Amino acid sequence: MAQAFVLAAVVLASAPLAPSARAQEQPPQAVATVGVGHGPAGVAYDQAKGEVFVTDLLNKSVSVISDVTNTVVATVKVGSDPAGDAYDPSRGEVFVTNALDNTTSVISDSSDAVVATVNVGGGPTGVAVDPAKGEVFVANYLGDTVSVISDSTNSVVATVAVGHYPYAPIYDPSKGEVFVTDALDNATSVISDATNALVATVGVGGGPTGSAYDLAKGEVFVTNYLGSTVSVISDATNTVVATVKVGTHPTDVAYDSMTGQVFVTNAANNTVSVISDATNTVVATVNVGSAPSGVDYDAGKGEVFAANNGGDTVSVISAASVSATSSTVPEFPTASLAFIALVAVATVALVSRRAREARPAFER
């Protein structure tokens, strides 16, 4: 929330209700397109204000979109190469990773201004909020660590060693654990928030990037950029229970609590795949803008916001038009593709700043 991407995700405060069984009523579609800054990457939904925060990688800024009007209502200056972001409901703040500065900016949603800057590890990309402990987990892509920030003091209280090129963390409220994709290792690290220690490592597909938590099923969905698949991890066993084929270069992923569906951005196809968590199959594909990267779900409107890194826009998808078929309910472009994924953000921006032309380190 996506996950890294992702890559950051919103943690829902309560378990969703299971939707009733129904057939798909109409094809899902993008209902609006919002122009934002240069190189949109991460997306985070602010449930208190009904706003969506989008990091503008090449503008050193964050665009704030009203979900009522689908227009940009504020632009917030942050650090260099803002990549991932996540909303902290307990503080009414948004945490934004600045990949080139090795910092995290803290934005107050009441003033749309930066109220603190926190030094973290090398090349921070994805970020996730643990509201139960009041902590924020930042993946340090170039440091092979995760920085744990106290949201009450805006200071780092722990540093956790994980796998190589950690990219996008996601918080699992039912287990009190944080799942972090390790892009180079083809694995996901599991951190206990009780001890801030690594408790498990789960092998997934090639080049994992974004992650999202499905509260209803107790599962974590991980996009495998190099495998064009999504791995589904059971948080009860920390094992992969399903692998879902999606589009080319899936980058980020978001969970829709109302329909029990999972939305995956496919960077090379300019599409979003919709997965039913009841069947772990793709039930729809939505055309969006150029090189979609970060994505998040807006529970207030029942919409999904996908950042189109190659088009400087955000596509708004009506999730209500995609219906579950059961009662049960997270870069790496090739040289010719626009730069879209946050792993590429971390690698390329930190090394050459030619973010839209280069491959990430682990794909070479």
Image (cartoon, rainbow, N blue to C red):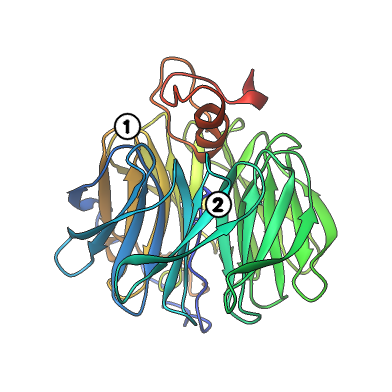
* Foreground of the two, 220 or 159: 159
Residue indicated by mark 1:
310
Residue indicated by mark 2:
103
Residue visible at 83% across and 72% down in the picture: 195
Query: Is 236 situated left or right of 316 in this image?
Result: right
Which of the two labelled residues, at mark 1 and mark 2, occupies the earlier sequence position?
A: 2
Classify the position of the C terminus by image quarter.
top right
Check disc 1 and give the amino acid type. Answer: Gly
- Spot occupied by residue 193 in the image (x, y as percentages of width and height): 74, 72
Classify 10 Å Cα crowding around label 2: few (below 14), some (14-19), many (20 and above).
many
- Spot occupied by residue 218 in the image (x, y as percentages of width and height): 65, 70
Picture quarter containing residue 80? top left
Q: CA distance from mark 1 to mark 2?
A: 25 Å
Residue 239: tell me if it is visible: no
Query: Is 148 situated left or right of 38 in this image?
Result: right
Picture quarter containing residue 226? top right
